[in-house]
Amino acid sequence: MRKVKKAVIPVAGLGTRFLPATKAMPKEMLTVVDRPVVQYAVDEALEAGIEHIVFVTGRNKHVIEDYFDIQPELLDTLTRSGKHEQLASLNRLQPQPGTISFTRQQAPHGLGHAVWCARDIVGDEPFALLLPDMVSFGEKGCLSGVMDLYEQTGGNVVAVEQCDPMETGSYGIVGKGARVGPGFAITGMVEKPAPEAAPSNYYINGRYVLQPDIFDLLDTQERGAGNEIQLTDAMVRLATSQEFFASPFEGRMFDCGSKDGFIQANVAFALARDDIRGMVLEPIEEMIVSRRRRIQAA
Ligand code: G1P
């Protein structure tokens, strides 16, 4: 079985749900506590053993490239002012030269098209895919579970969670087959089905390990849901010749592409941090109590 060394992270989306914040700033640079959303995806990929990250960017996303580069003036200033802790934390996050690539998706044709744009850099090897809007929260990052199952099964693996059966129209949905290790074999996949057409309520939560054969299929993939080139549609075609498995995620995924998910992620990550919990827990509890009182009084 070929090792998964590269991860693709698409960051070309416009982020219209966060206007006006995203008018001049990529949505992937919005912060959850004190780190940009995209940093969480990179950390999760590295934790899972990934060695090289391929970003699929677009116009107005150059800040992401700058973010992952060294900022000599900043490092000098921190050194001179003795801010050793901040310096060490920046150094810890700094990717090694040559371990990150950037390629551009020139027009917003959909997720399938964004992934296809990475084909030359990924080459002929299995790769991981992380959709950075979905921020993984839990003891172990979601991709680690996907990689563990992949090591047992080979083929293609996607992470899944269960959604409200009425919300299948927002996601890629998989059909549940026989149990395999901690996961199950996938019997079918549909992109954004209406509840009555959904094979289950297990939704694809934005983490994948895919074989490179997906690129040839994406080459000829016709537009699907939302008039976009859908990755799930190409996966359905790949599933006619290769196996797909689902890795149920034990933690929790926050959809930071939506306002509610983004705010919940900020609260969850803040409460999980020893240096911040104390500062936010009490005020949040007070806000909740006083809101309840207002509702009861009304
Ligand atoms: C994409 C995928 C979908 C998946 C979702 C997870 O949809 O196409 O299969 O369930 O991400 O966030 P999007 O959110 O880009 O519409």
Image: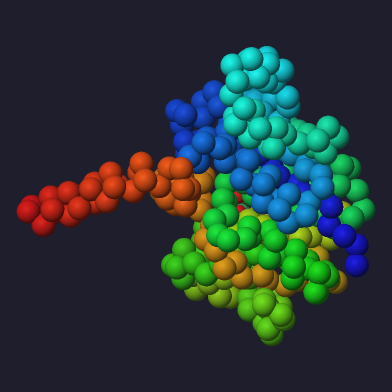
Q: Position of residue 97 (x, y in %)?
A: 83, 32
Tell me if I can see residue 220 in this picture.
no
**283 left or right of 212 in image:** left
The x, y position of residue 258, in whole percent, is 47, 46
Q: Report the quarter where the N terminus lies.
A: bottom right
- Left or right: residue 258 compared with residue 109: left
Up/down of 33 relative to 47, above or below? above
Residue at 69% x, 85% y: name it. Answer: 178
Q: Is residue 8 left or right of residue 260?
A: right
Asked if residue 254 lies left or right of residue 80, the reply is left
Q: Extreme front residue here?
A: 82
The quarter of the picture where residue 147 lies is bottom right
| Residue visible at 81% across and 54% down in the picture | 127
Q: Residue at the location (75% across, 47% down)? A: 8
Where is residue 70? Give x, y as percent: 73, 24
> Between 139 and 148, which is closer to the camera in this rendering?
139
Residue for point 56% across, 75% down:
200
Expressed as whole percent of the image width and height from the top left, the position of residue 144 reads 70, 61
Within the displayed image, which quadrant is ligand 1 positioned in?
bottom right
